[in-house]
Image (cartoon, grey):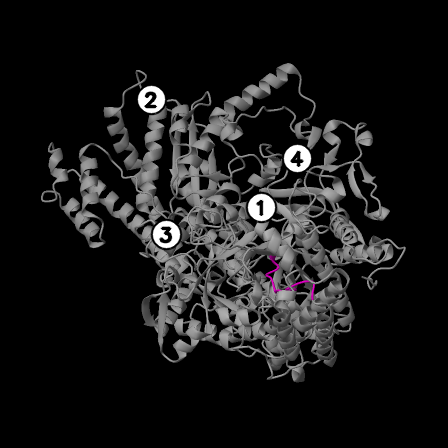
Amino acid sequence: MRIARRFTTEDRDVYEAIPFRLTQSEIRNPDGSVVFKADQVEVPADWSQVASDILAQKYFRKRGVPKALKRVEEADVPAFLWRGEPDEAALAGLPEAERSGGETSAKQVFDRLAGTWAYWGWKGGYFDTEEDARAYYDEMRFMLAAQMAAPNSPQWFNTGLHWAYGIDGPSQGHHYVDYRTGKLTRAASAYEHPQPHACFIQSVEDDLVNDNGIMDLWVREARLFKYGSGTGSNFSRLRGENEPLAGGGKSSGLMSFLKIGDRAAGAIKSGGTTRRAAKMVTVDLDHPDIVEYVNWKVVEEQKVAALVAGSKLCGKHLNAVMAACREPVVEGDADAALDPKRNPALKAAIKAARAVAIPESYIKRVMQFAAQGYERVEFPTYDTDWDSEAYRTVSGQNSNNSVRVPDAFIEAVLADGDWRLIRRTDGKVSKSLKARELWDMIAHAAWASADPGVQFDTTINDWHTCPAGGRINASNPCSEYMFLDDTACNLASLNLLAFMDDDGRFAIEDYEHATVLWTVTLEISVLMAQFPSPQIAKLSYDYRTLGLGYANIGGLLMAMGLAYDSEAGRALCGALTAILTGAAYRTSAEMARELGAFPGFQANRESMLRVIRNHRRAARGMQGGYEELSVKPVPLDIANCRDPRLAEAAARVWDEALKLGEENGFRNAQVSVIAPTGTIGLVMDCDTTGIEPDFALVKFKKLAGGGYFKIINRTVPRALATLGYDEAQAEEMVRYAVGHGTLRGAPAINHASLKAKGFTAAALDALENALASAFDIKFAFNKWTLGDDFCRKVLNFEEAELNDLGFDMLSALGFTRAEVEAANTYACGAMTLEGAPYLKDEHLAVFDCANPCGRLGTRYLSVESHIRMMAAAQPFISGAISKTINMPNTATVEDCKDAYLLSWKLGIKANALYRDGSKLSQPLAASLIDEAEDQDEVVEALVAAPAAAKASQVAERIVEKVVEKVIEKTQSDRQRLPQRRKGYTQKAVVGGHKVYIRTGEYEDGRLGEIFVDMHKEGAAFRSLMNNFAIAISIGLQYGVPLEEFVEAYTFTRFEPSGMVEGNDAIKMATSVLDYIFRELAISYLSRHDLAHVNPEDLSPDTTGKGETQSEVADPLPGSAARAVQETVRRIASKGYVRSLTVFPGGLGGGVQGANALAVDPQAFAGSVAVSELSYGQETLIEEEMADDTYVRRVREARLKGYEGDSCGECGNFTLVRNGTCLKCDTCGGTSGCS
């Protein structure tokens, strides 16, 4: 093939035209701890910090890159494409530890990818001349650097490691077809043939243990999950429950085996990554077990609800029974307390327990426990977190579920007919039910649990290019790749916004050129690839399916001033999709002319050409004349195509594709899909992913040094200019959305009105500093911003008011709710353009997003608008479109049925719905969290706290007496702590639950007591933890070694558990007790084996921080040093300083690690005198100071357009829905394979 240049110039280095910069890449947890850090990373200057972080964290090779390379000469290969390998002679002159490292520049990655593609393309005969190969290499590097396009993640991970650096390893059991001989070959190397494919479809036979059977599928799935790929299968061949077995007996049915596969996928997730296994389960609607399958996740979610509510009710009532059993009834008669007839409190507790269906036998068991002297019931409680023990206990949580819906079923639904379920063993009818009854079940299940999605089987197979090879039965997990079983697809996406000219026109020629080059790239990737099984290697070679697509259609539409929900917007989407697929098929036919059609083409020639003709008719806007289609597609809306060049180009490329295909055949059976483009969308700085609209108008962009700043979408100013607004008007509208970041000039609440209330210049300066990053002005008006003295002495607020979390200072100052809202909008922004000055009503739709924007936004895109956009693109896609349609919480089951039916009528191949709140694990929407109710709960907790503190003191005396009676003393007397004692307080969050640990020490630093507070967890749980801590303390004071408690309680497993925030040494805990005793063991016993290493140090190629890690200032003279050490030992808590050696003089190099303490004396000015407070008060004040509460963070995340869940990889609340998965905008992690 001849390769033209459009973006580069011959004999000029590509990177001369692209400025680069050095940056630091860092990703942090919400608590500030570092997840990943890399210094001196070289990236293109125009890349955002997020794109730079994704490249450095996920796509840079971290180790094994030689510091010196040499080229390996190959005959008939151009010198610039010779592969690299370590230069052993040059490396011999370097210290062994410095001979290799990781990639540090984006140029290395671009060269690695493009060079490998060009190398294999040359060897495969894809280029006419060396100049063509060089042009291809340069053009591809430019497009990667300019963020015009990107391949799927496995390409970034694997491609080029052998070609660029000579990295190799033993075979992992993969196979490939040798392009020279056509023979299936077992790979001898792990890296020479990379694995660039992300999407797999696998078959499964109705066989238990043989090859390609049920158990064999779990092994094949595991091999894919291990390397981060996704897989889908249709399980309809498996016989239904109670169907006969060949050896006698009856089958346990489809569901029993699906549950095994679900457990296997979940185990692999927990074994190696926080990301769940990406898996699609598909079942035909005529399967005998279809009813159980459709309701699978509904029933399992009900089990979760039962576990959560039941466990908490059991814990509450059983402990109430236990407490009643300890009530003194008749002095000297212990049995009376255990007799409900003589103990009214016990009788009432038993009645209350029975009323909520606590099992009678368990009530009796608790009473028997009490009779034996036990004082508490340890009953674990569960929560609805998606990664909690409750969800791990039930099945069906590790896959996306879909049903295959044929046209015959839809017709039966419309006619209110019957639907037959067919036995798999003999083809007889197993059961007959009303089609509408089953349809209602599907819609209800989708409404209640977001599964199953639907795949329209007849439509899918009507557009099948290779029916002679078999039916299309299934898809990959995200539902965009639909083809034969045991095939794979590698993906790439073009960034549509990158092809928009400065004058607002779409650069059609550049777009076509990019499509040609990326089609060639994906084809070369099939040639060079290895696959996880021989069958997949053979069929992927025979059919050579490609998955080219695009991202940022939502951003492009907004930039062009077109509404996502408009005829013109859909026409633009249809035209661009038609051009992409038509140009790709044209390129495939051109490659077939040079290299031959794909091996399966001749057997499918007529079918494939029929499909191409149907694509061409749709591209020409034809309403009829389609061949063998049950459902007519939505053709290109030429009349509403604002740019006639696009419609003309669409017709032209399909004319050329058909003509060349008829002459030469095609090199590829499929060429396009619309993928979610999760992580690669971030690396291309796309405003929107796949075919999605934008999710918010105001984004929070990351700064290189940490932190975020508020910014309007970059497409908004372009849209305003396109719509005819001048710069001044646009600037004022942007300020309305983003905010002014100040109260100067604000309505009602401004510097003048605040001065009238007594605010000083210093107080106003403090306010302004806080407002620069505030999400709401209320967050700035508090005693920590303004100072306690100012609030009490100048503003005349009482201490009780200032300590009240529900206290609204602005209301107390006399400002009305309307005044606060107006000032808040001015200072912090409306986060929407609804209500913006100058904006005309007819332009509002241009800025509509998937969700309402900010507090004031009410507009959002309808369900129908999403479906119609999919329908505009579907006729021009070889595969399908990965998309989940968000529905409001108020949507009904009938709405779900309507959405699915409309999808079928418009010719869409597959669809999935997600109703807001349909998963128990989803945090409450901001609109459902009433602020007044929140404040009432907080006030209630505050009022209850002093009583709890008193109860804790009473409980201590009771427990002391009991323990003193029964404990076997290991020393003659209890060694009590001094009245004034050392210790420390550690606050952390374990699995989303705040935990406070306070310690008391003897004068020699030994631990003598602990207090544990989780005061928001309910009275029963709080009392249990308080009394547990008291019992441990008494044990310590009687001489029980701390080591014994550590051995007993570490690695205990119950909820709450999971990620730990706020502790510099512990990052995960299996339970609260596991966390507590890890903390104590590290602090008092130097048990660093129980600490978790900094994530940065877990990398196999970590090199530490060199000499600066141990750099200290010159020590003091010996006697002075000893004096300092003794002073520190005497006055400092041993647990607080842990096992550190105190270097007199401090850290000379200014390096601060996890255990380096820097004290700023000014930080204590005006601080709370903790020594004067009781423990309960200490905790409450610490609680007040924690602005970043979980509920607030969920609310903020939802208002910013995020889902409200925290990311499983980095913990940040920046997850957005992406196709059928969730994607983190901070670290790029996804909940699936996107």
Residue 969 sits in quarter: top left
First in sequence: mark 3 vs mark 1: 1
The front one of 980 and 518 is: 518
How many numbered marks, from 0 up? 4
- Residue that appears at 27% across and 20% down: 968
Query: Mark 1 and mark 3 in contact (Cβ < 8 Å)?
Result: no
Query: Mark 3 and mark 2 in contact (Cβ < 8 Å)?
Result: no
Residue of label 3? 256
Separation of disc 3 and disc 4 at Cα?
43 Å
User: Mark 2 or mark 3: which is in front?
Assistant: 3
Separation of disc 3 and disc 1 at Cα?
27 Å
Extreme residue toward the left, this view: 341
Residue of label 4? 1101
Residue of label 1? 227
Label 3, secondary structure: give it: helix
Q: Residue flagged by tag 3: what amino acid is it? A: Ser
- Residue that appears at 61% across and 38% down: 1096
Side (left or right) of 742 relative to 361: right
First in sequence: mark 3 vs mark 4: 3
User: Mark 2 or mark 4: which is in front?
Assistant: 4
First in sequence: mark 2 vs mark 4: 2
Separation of disc 4 and disc 1 at Cα?
20 Å
Side (left or right) of 532 relative to 705: left
Place of residue 1022 in the rendered image (x, y in percent of width and height, measured from the top left): 34, 42
Can residue 69 be seen by looking at this rendering?
yes
- Magenta stretch: includes residue 325: no
The front one of 939 and 387 is: 387
Q: Residue flagged by tag 1: what amino acid is it? A: Tyr
Residue 1037 sits in quarter: top left
- Range of magenta residues: 666-678
Residue of label 2? 1038
